[in-house]
Image (tube, rainbow, N blue to C red):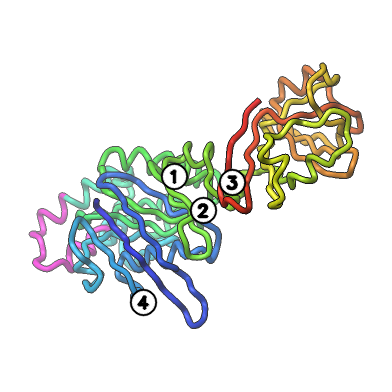
Amino acid sequence: MAIAVRNLTKRFGTFQAVGGVSFEVPAGELVALLGPSGSGKSTILRIIAGLEPADSGDVEITGEDASNLSTQQRGVGFVFQHYALFRHMTIRQNVAFGLQVQKPRPPASEIKARVEELLELVQLLVHADRYPSQLSGGQRQRVALARALATRPKVLLLDEPFGALDAKVRDELRTWLRRLHDEVHVTSLFVTHDQQEAFEVADQVIVLNKGKVEQMGPPQELYEHPATPFVTEFLGSVNVLRAETVLGMELGDEVPLPLDVANSNDNSAVYVRPHDFEITRQSNGRPAWSARIRKLIPLGGLVRLDLTLLDGTTLNVQLTRERCLQLALVDGEDIYVSPKDWKVFHESKRFVENYVI
């Protein structure tokens, strides 16, 4: 493994930022540390880089125990959210900086060739003699990435690299970073709070919450088979219904729940994604709830329906624009809604089960 973290802990006063975290990053993969603010993701990254000491636990980089090594000795490249470029240096000089202070220092001709190679790679060679203030935010972040790669690091660490950029530039850089990684194949670990960003870019995603790992795996696996309620709710919009509430709705035919849920006394919760509902104008003999459309909200190729059930429960449902037009739905009308796919969290068993009809 290129990176191995074992039983990592870190406290700041009485606050436990990292609580016994362990994971591995395979060589050549691009892995995301995903979680909300305060989940410990940036602290973990800084500990791996040697910028923050751990209270306990071990860090290995390419098979070597790096726990007591300095940042320079660990052989990592680090990309900060706010670029951290030297304003008084040109782009060329910024990228060359790490090589110029390296011991032993490479020959000038080698430094020049490496800088030009990287500026070509990040598509900024034409701007080599400009200063950071003369570039856009996206261009500056590409310079920061080139500088981090200049010394040929064993691993690349990125702390919310797109967090300071606007949405359009973030989208472009996500695609660009994935392509770049496929070219250079450097093992990379990046921090983000953006689920879409993690899913678009990463080979594997590690979901963090309150300083602990909730789940790790390929993006699609996490989305389709979340292990905990937190992962279910954090990875996209979801409707959460208490099982007893669902079973107690006197709304005509009830949507059937499995017997172990129907008979449970552990406050099980039912999770349904907005796109996992079926909307019809008639019940068609299938179990369904009667609902009223409070508001139709166009979202490009999708339409969000804010629904209210007869007992006052609200639902967020998404349809394709074509399906919405086909049904000719309007605000205020009554329709039928039923889940096609749902997940049930058993409080006593501490796991999520998936059901499809």
The amino acid pointed to by label 1 is: Leu
- What is the distance, in whole Å, between disc 1 and disc 3 at their CAs? 27 Å
Q: Name the N-terminal-most of marks 1 and 3.
A: 1
Q: Name the N-terminal-most of marks 3 and 4.
A: 4
The residues colored magenta run: 95-113
For marks 2 and 4, give the one nearer the viewer: 4
User: What residue appears at the point 86 percent right and 33 percent down from the top-left corner?
Assistant: 291
Q: Which mark is residue 165?
A: 2
Give neighbour class at mark 3: few <14, some 14-19, many 20+ (Cα, 10 Å): many
Q: Secondary structure at mark 2?
A: loop
Q: Name the N-terminal-most of marks 2 and 3.
A: 2
Residue wearing tag 3: 232
The amino acid pointed to by label 4 is: Asp
Give percent across and percent down for residue 168.
54, 43
For marks 2 and 3, give the one nearer the viewer: 3
Q: From this viewpoint, is residue 152 visible?
A: yes
